[in-house]
Image (cartoon, rainbow, N blue to C red):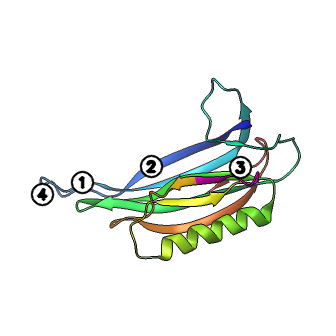
Amino acid sequence: MTNISIVTDYEKRITRRADRNDAYDRDDTATDHTIMGFEVVGDDSYKDFSVSFNPVPDRDYYLLMVIYDTGDSFGRDAGQLSLIDLYENQEMAADAAKAIRAHANNDDYDFNLKLIAENGVERSLYTPWKGYFESIQSIEVRAIRMNSRKWKF
């Protein structure tokens, strides 16, 4: 297995200030993310996930991610990013995105989703975008290379 770290940056901003006269109110926030690529990292480093292939430079890989909003009775937090997996095969990434969408659209509060990785192994994925206060902004598959692209959203 190869350990992958997605190289990201983010900017969090306040979109609505809390009402000072309401002891329970809090700021609403939104987060913008910039993804600059990915790195192969060692076992002792932080990793976002492990993949069954050995990435090479100058080739597209496909990052699956979910952007969602969350909150509570007192405020909202938009633009939360959940990195799902990195794929060699764009079609497999698209199929996983469809499975996430189908799971998100059912009305139960099952917070675990089973996805098939490229090596054929089933894995369980926690779905933080499912809940009473949560909603999905987007499910995206983006082409990404080792530290070579930069896109903001």
Secondary structure at badge 3 equals loop
Magenta stretch: residue 151 in it?
no
Quadrant in which the C terminus is drawn: bottom right
Q: Which of disc 1 and disc 2 is earlier in sequence? A: 2
Residue range highlighted in magenta: 118-123
**What distance separates the C-alpha of mark 2 from that of mark 1?**
15 Å
Quick one: label 3, few (<14), some, or many (20+) residues within 10 Å? few
Q: Three-letter amino acid code at disc 3?
A: Lys
Secondary structure at badge 4 equals loop
| Residue marked by disc 1 | 26
Q: Three-letter amino acid code at disc 4?
A: Asp
> From what the image shows, is residue 68 above or below residue 33?
below
Secondary structure at badge 1 equals loop
| Residue marked by disc 4 | 22
Give the residue displayed 74% in from the left and 37% down from the top: 1
Q: Three-letter amino acid code at disc 2?
A: Lys
| Residue marked by disc 2 | 12
Q: Which of disc 4 and disc 3 is earlier in sequence? A: 4
Q: Position of residue 15 (x, y in %)?
A: 37, 59
Q: Position of residue 110 (x, y in %)?
A: 42, 64
Of the numbered discs in the image, which one, if any, rests on residue 150? 3
